Image (spheres, rainbow, N blue to C red):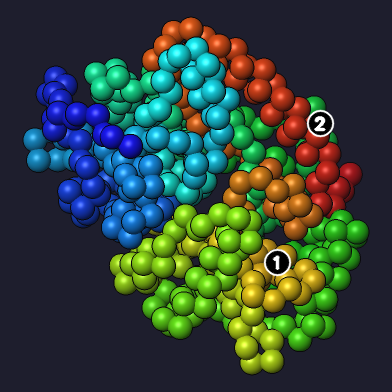
Amino acid sequence: MARPALRPRHTLPAYELRIADAPASIDAAAWNALLARQSQPTPFMRHEYLAALHESGSATPRTGWVPCFMTLWQGSELIAACPLYLKSHSYGEYVFDWAWASAHEQHGVPYYPKAVVAVPFTPVPGTRLMARDGQARALLVQALRQWCGQEGVSSAHVLFASDDDVQTCSDQQLMLRHTVQFHWQNMAPTLPAARGSLPPEGALAALGRPGGISGYRDFEHFLASQSQDKRKKIRQERRRVADAGVGFRWARGADIRAADWDFFYRCYERTYLEHGNPPYLTRDFFARMAAHLPEAWLLFIAERGGRPIASSLIAVSTLPSSAEGQKDHETLVAYGRYWGALERVDCLHFEACYYQPLQWCITHGAQRFEGGAQGEHKMARALLPVQAASAHWLAHPAFADAVQRFLAREGEGVQDYLQALRSRSPFKPPVA
């Protein structure tokens, strides 16, 4: 994709906006320090992760991701920033706007390039608009819209945004859109007696409510919170894997050996190729993760007869959360990311991607395991539905109006879908 001519700097009153054409152009320490101040940081927004995507050839102009990272400065202080890309397609985003692009093209209005504030290939809710405070975040959104207008970009999309991002975008008249993900909490939820109400909007508004503040003691304690049929099903699935002679080992961070990374990539690549697509991420990307961000990764390897046959890779984070009005605290969160197998074993996917990670989370006191986008089957493994949010701005008034009406209808459907999922909780009903 040909990149539009960019002026290196734009100016807002008392602030300076700089556009970087590569993550390496931005000071890593300043970027990560700003991230650590946010209410919903994730390892995927760290400078090391974003730089690895670019430098490994995974997210580059060649693959349709043109970096235009936006940073807002006050003197020598970085007060706001976001990972901004110009896109020539809508792959690797997981918030689907193909119909919007088609409508533009049918009316002779180019949709691409569009601007996305996102982590490529990573549908994990969290901070996207890093800012020193609410005012700086609002200025960043204003700068984004102004820049898109000056550069003739059709639209801007803030994907899988944090609650703070959503509020600011809403205040700045961006349109909101919600999708559904499935997350596990390390506490047994119970359904409210009144089933008609829905949770508030927000990236992490889970259905159900905490049944206590303590985490599960062990996997059996977790199973005891399930309804009888779900508990029986999980035990049967785990038994099938064990009866097939499959065992698991795990390694975290620097303990993941180069040979383990090589084996994982064979599994990861094979999964994509079996579905007829090349993998989004290169082997070099994971080499850079091993070298520059090893603490963010947890690898499970399935073995049978002394041979590795499958693997799943989980991201973990202990970044402090610094929400306004709260004291800094650290929360261990796990994120299901990638998996693959070289041999087929019944129920191996469930064991590698859910039961092994959940058992690890319980043992190590993780608060949450985020199972990622889509997949109602995750509810049977005690991952409950949550809403994930994005925000959208379209330059063309007529298309913006049409999308606004579409989102209103779609939003009603999402609420109905959540209501239907609520009735299928895998947990025991509350005791009267």
Foreground residue among 408 and 59: 59
Residue 416 image position (x, y, % from top left): 76, 27
Give the vertical position of 304 relative to 368 (above or below): below
Residue 78 or residue 195, whichever sits in front = 78
Viewer-side label of 2, 1: 1
In the rendered image, residue 298, in percent from the top left (x then y), is placed at: 50, 70
Looking at the rendered structure, which numbered label has been put on residue 349? 1
Question: Seen in the image, is 338 located left or right of residue 317?
Answer: right
In the picture, the quarter occupied by the N terminus is: top left
Q: Amino acid at mark 2?
A: Ala
Q: Position of residue 69 (x, y in %)?
A: 26, 39
Residue name at image x 41 percent, y 46 percent: 119
Residue 268 appears in view:
yes
> Looking at the rendering, in which quadrant would you find the C terminus?
top right
Could you tell me which secondary element the residue under label 2 belongs to? loop
Residue type, numbered disc 1: His
Number of the label disc, if any, that sits on residue 194: 2
Residue 134 falls left or right of residue 13? right
